[in-house]
Image (spheres, rainbow, N blue to C red):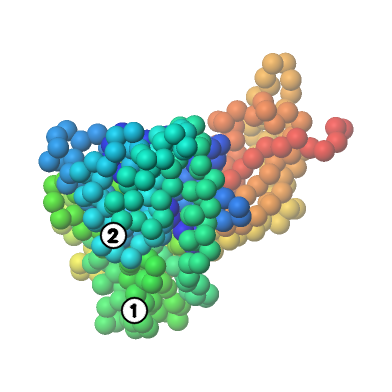
Amino acid sequence: MKPIVAIVGRPNVGKSTLFNNLVGDKIAIVDDAPGVTRDRLYRETEWNGSEFVVVDTGGLEPRNNEFMMTKIKEQAEVAMNEADVILFVVDGRCGVNPLDEEIAYILRKKNKPVILCVNKIDNYIEQQNEVYEFWALGFEKLVGISGEHKVNLGDMLDMVTEIIEKMDIPEEEEDVLKLAIIGKPNAGKSSLVNKFSGEERTIVSDIAGTTRDAIDTLIEFNDQKYMIIDTAGIRRKSKVEESLEYYSVLRAIKSIKRADVCLLMLDGQEGLTEQDKRIAGIAAEELKPIIIVVNKWDLVDKNSTTMEKMRESILVELPFLSYAPVEFVSALTGQRTTRLLEIADQIFEEYNKRISTGILNSVLKEIVMMNTPPTRKGRVVKINYATQVSVAPPRFVLFCNYPELIHFSYARYVENKFREAFGFEGSPLLISFEKKNSEE
């Protein structure tokens, strides 16, 4: 599990500029899947061999001062609870602002490492006094930076990695399938965890998350152990929090990164929301196997076609999860909940499945015979052979003479045919086209 570094601060102090300069060119989304949200708030990066996840809380432009105060304080609370290191950004040109003091008060209350980043310091010698003023906020680590001009970012990142290297990241237990239950608040995640760990199954132990501020529940079902990573701690205390998407996104990132399989919980009465799509997009970008779980199915007015119609509409809205099984359950009554554990086992197997090169290439031959790659610019594309280069997720490389001429739609056709032939239900599938070494 990579540590999370959250950037926090009031509006217009330069958080997003700092974020963009910290992650640099690493912001390309793997596989560019259609429909996956592009305005992601987090990126993985590294400094001097230490890898970590940077989370941006920028883009917060509240409507009035009272609203702003509440919302930013909430955001600081979230960062304090969920992040491993906090970059608290202030504006060196403006001096200490009352809102900076409010945020500082919240961040000081808990024992989390905070680096106070005095931003917009382009010339440290000339602006020393502007930096020193911020010692009044009471943080041990303080650095003057310019996020825009990349001044002193190295010193700041050295502080980050120094903290990370001293952190005690817990080891994950082997031989346990880790299931992350993700989704927006009130979709029934807690009820599902309670149902999983009910009297008919043995609770082996409850492990309080050491650096995670979450409860992992270890359960046993049919002689298989499962670690349920619950994000049910996401509880919205006010209307303000209701629009605080950052809250659920940050927790979802942590859970998804640790998980072997993700269960995306939707509220069957409410249907798919924008926040569900955002969380689904994170799971897809992290290339995790996923089950879409429509909960509260016992409360939905339905007829013989309701289930199929809802399944279709969900997959239309989430085209990048077309491979995910959609299950309809009631966490409250327990209807079809144990089936989720069985499906999780199956799709994790699919995620780790390896196809022999011989079988793969005989299937590929049929696929190409049925539908040859379109000729483009007068050149004929010839696909020679394929190989599976890795599992978890399954990754295939197809060698051909003109990989740059393969259209996205043809790649999707090959993926669909591979799924027809080999399964891979619930698992992302990566297919790339590369130039073969020697021309025939």
x, y (%) of residue 232? 27, 63
393 vs 358, nearest the viewer: 393
As shown in the figure, which amino acid type bears the numbered disc 1? Asp
Find numbered disc 1 in the image and state the secondary structure of the residue it sits on. strand
Does residue 54 appear in this view? yes
Query: Is 97 above or below relative to 166?
Result: above
Find numbered disc 2 in the image and state the secondary structure of the residue it sits on. helix
- Residue picked out by circle 1: 206
Query: Is 186 above or below relative to 124?
Result: below
x, y (%) of residue 123? 47, 33
Q: Is residue 132 left or right of residue 48?
A: left
Identify the residue at image location x=13%, y=51%. 238
- Residue picked out by circle 2: 108
Q: Quadrant of residue 222?
A: bottom left
Q: Residues within 10 Å of mark 1 (few under 14, many from 20)?
A: few
79 vs 266, nearest the viewer: 79
As shown in the figure, which amino acid type bears the numbered disc 2? Arg
Query: Is 248 above or below relative to 216?
Result: above
Identify the residue at image location x=61%, y=55%. 49
102 vs 413, nearest the viewer: 102
Does residue 78 appear in this view? no
What is the distance, in whole Å, between disc 1 and disc 2 at their CAs? 29 Å
Q: Is residue 280 left or right of residue 46?
A: left
